[in-house]
Image (tube, grey):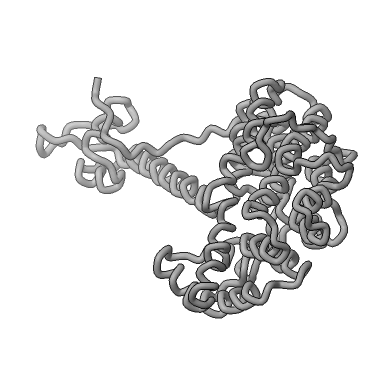
Amino acid sequence: MTWLTAEEALERLGTKPQTLYANVSRGRIRAKPDAADSRRSLYHSEDVARLAKRHAGRRKAASIAAETIDWGEPVLPTAISTIADGRLYYRGREAVALSERATFEQVAAFLWESQAAICPSIELLAGEPSRISGAFVLLARRAAADLPALGRAPAALKSEAGQVLATVAAALVPSQIDLPLHERLAQSWDRPDAAEPIRRALVLAAEHELNVSAFAARVTASSGASLAAATLSGLSTLTGPRHGGAWQGAVRLMELSREMGAREAIRTMLATEGVVRAFGHKLYPDGDPRAAAIMHSFEMPKLYAEIAALGAELLGEPANIDFALAAMAGHFDLPDDAPLVIFALSRTAGWLAHAIEQVTSGTMIRPRARYVGPSPEAH
């Protein structure tokens, strides 16, 4: 039997003396008086080794857990979508290929594993706000009134998902024309020639794995809250400048380019903001395929094409989907908030898919925090 001095035990454990003494008092580490010095104690080496191994495992687990929430390793199982080899797949089917012909409603049903693409028309009442603010109002109303999602059959949730999507569409596409949503959007903006690029954009932005808004929707759904509440969480997260609001960076880049030229505009944004959000994506090192597919669906405005080429040259990163949506809005002279409207309507399908999957999994998302504040007072 091997015994260690306090110094040796502390070195192997990597802890403070108080922790060593606490482990002894709790019976986790055996100790005995040092025969050479009765004022000192010796500690059982095997007990120390066992605790050291356990603590190392905890540190490793904590490190892994911290890394997973910052573009790290996959953290939640999902059958909805994945990004592999630089391509986006919806339930095993490549999203770009789906965008060639599928309507947004068909893709929504596919993501929900529903039998039919259902998006009934819901009429806005007089005086209710439309577009993004209206979506918040209508979703909040539903969130307060709808049944909790927990304990309900998948068929009932999928049916309700169509109603929730229709609620969002009622605010974002204030048109009662009985047409697919991409055509209704184009008609509401009086830009019928934009319908086909809008359809492709709606399909390609519908779902994107465990992005921040999808995660927010899943956290809400895991509590058992209604599908509308989960969608409201996703929409709230989407409005952040590092997520759905990133298209504004592309618009700002365009405005600067008109004033000082594309090359100087890119240089200015790098110098003042440290990033040009219209370019690059961590999950697509070789370029965002969604952006390429959207931009190929219309003739790029000359200045946008110049910015895209210069951005790729100077930054080493191709344009991303935020740039593509801004370029589409610029080409068809769509309203200023058109990229956000398209993104919000489209991503609603993905939020609902994640909410349904999370509820049916039966698990709650409740991670532990790693406390780094002042030491708790002893009582």
The residue drawn where x is 89% and y is 42% is 178
Q: How far across and down, in percent of the image, does residue 195 sit?
A: 81, 57
Query: How many discs appear?
Result: 0
Q: Is residue 351 above or below residue 311?
A: above
Report which quarter residue 36 is drawn in.
top left
Q: Is residue 64 above or below residue 24?
A: below
Is 318 situated left or right of 104 in this image? left
Is 285 situated left or right of 90 in this image? left
Of 252 and 47, nearer the camera is 252
Of 178 and 292, nearer the camera is 178
Of 100 and 250, nearer the camera is 250
The residue drawn where x is 60% and y is 30% is 364
Quarter holding the C terminus is top left
Q: How far across and down, in percent of the image, does residue 18 sit?
A: 22, 34
Is 228 situated left or right of 1 in this image? right
Q: Is residue 336 above or below residue 62?
A: below
Of 25 and 209, nearer the camera is 209
Quarter holding the N terminus is top left
The residue drawn where x is 18% and y is 35% is 41
Q: How far across and down, in percent of the image, does residue 133 sit?
A: 62, 38
Residue 95 visible in the snapshot: no
The residue drawn where x is 86% and y is 43% is 177
Q: How far across and down, in percent of the image, does residue 276 sit?
A: 51, 66
Q: Is residue 226 above or below residue 339?
A: above
Residue 7 visible in the snapshot: yes
